[in-house]
Image (tube, rainbow, N blue to C red):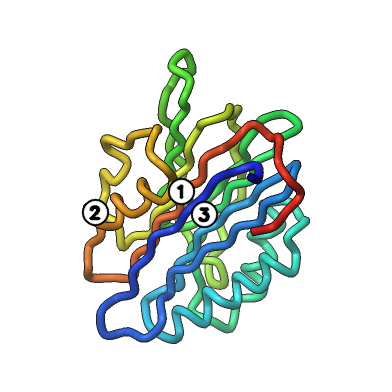
């Protein structure tokens, strides 16, 4: 088991052969990073932009979250561009650093009842990587074992985090959200990541 337990549920827009909604996960003993990307529009050009961003994330995976956004922005100038939300978990101090450009929603649930607020929402800054990069600023949040992060693209209706059962498996949560909140008029993707206790094998999934 790694630093996080994670799952994805996704659906391509009917009639399209490729989805512009993609995800990236890298997990090791001391750190875990997850990102969800959405190429502007849909179809093959959106998928091409998202795939280019994924390749950039993998190439520069060890760099800071803000630098990763800057790298993607430069790489995507000749494409439609993407919107992206990214989170980086750190086991050494039990923190999560996250930021988002565009309309990919992010919600963090704190499992411990004494932590207030019990639910935190990612600040979504307007912009498109490859076209319009706003001023970048990441937020750092304290996390503990059992906390759950959810990222969802705009193919998922608002309110998707309502009635989330923190005891459910990550895949159950992702599947329920896609089933109940998927719009059906766009590509859709949900990524769920549960933070564990840091006692992880040094593996990459």
Which residue shows up at 25% across the image and 79% down it?
Answer: 14
Lateral position of residue 14 relative to residue 93, left or right: left
Secondary element at tag 2: helix
Residues at marks 3 and 1 touching, judged by CB atoms closer than 8 Å: no
Badge 2: few (under 14), some or many (20 or more) residues near its Cα, within 10 Å?
Answer: some
Residue 157: percent from left, percent from top: 25, 54
Which residue shows up at 65% across the image and 42% down it?
Answer: 3
In the rendered image, which residue does mark 2 sit on?
181
Lateral position of residue 205 relative to residue 187, left or right: right
Q: How many marks?
A: 3
Badge 1: few (under 14), some or many (20 or more) residues near its Cα, within 10 Å?
Answer: many
Of the two numbered discs 2 and 3 in the rendering, the one whose residue sits closer to the viewer: 2
Closer to the camera in the image, 188 or 80? 188
Closer to the camera in the image, 72 or 58? 58
Which residue shows up at 65% across the image and 73% down it?
Answer: 55
Residues at marks 1 and 2 touching, judged by CB atoms closer than 8 Å: no
Q: CA distance from mark 2 to mark 3?
A: 19 Å
In the rendered image, which residue does mark 1 sit on?
192
The image quadrant of residue 8 is: bottom left
Nearest to N terminus: mark 1 or mark 2: 2
Name the mark on residue 85: 3
Nearest to N terminus: mark 3 or mark 1: 3
Secondary element at tag 3: strand
Residue 181: percent from left, percent from top: 24, 54
Of the two numbered discs 3 and 1 in the rendering, the one whose residue sits closer to the viewer: 1
Secondary element at tag 1: strand
Closer to the camera in the image, 132 or 123? 123
Query: Image height check: is 98 above or below 50?
Result: above
Badge 3: few (under 14), some or many (20 or more) residues near its Cα, within 10 Å?
Answer: many
Residue 144: percent from left, percent from top: 58, 27
Query: Image height check: is 188 above or below 198?
Result: below
């Amino acid at each position: 088991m790694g630093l996080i337990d994670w799952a994805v549920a996704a659906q391509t827009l009917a009639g399209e052969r490729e989805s512009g909604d993609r995800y990236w996960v890298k997990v090791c003993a001391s750190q875990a990073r997850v990102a969800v990307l959405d190429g502007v529009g849909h179809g093959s050009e959106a998928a091409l932009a998202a795939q280019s961003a994924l390749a950039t994330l993998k190439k520069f995976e060890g760099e800071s979250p803000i630098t990763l956004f800057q790298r993607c922005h430069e790489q995507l100038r000749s494409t439609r561009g993407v919107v992206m939300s990214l989170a980086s978990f750190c086991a050494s101090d039990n923190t999560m650093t996250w930021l988002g450009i565009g309309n990919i929603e992010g919600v963090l649930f704190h499992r411990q009842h004494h932590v207030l607020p019990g639910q935190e929402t990612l600040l979504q800054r307007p912009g498109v990587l490859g076209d319009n990069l706003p001023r970048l600023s990441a937020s750092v949040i304290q996390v503990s074992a059992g906390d759950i992060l959810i990222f969802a693209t705009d193919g998922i209706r608002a309110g998707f985090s309502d009635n989330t059962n923190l005891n459910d498996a990550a895949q159950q949560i992702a599947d329920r959200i896609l089933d109940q909140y998927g719009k059906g008029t766009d590509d859709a993707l949900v990524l769920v990541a549960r933070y564990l206790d840091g006692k992880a094998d040094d593996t990459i999934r």
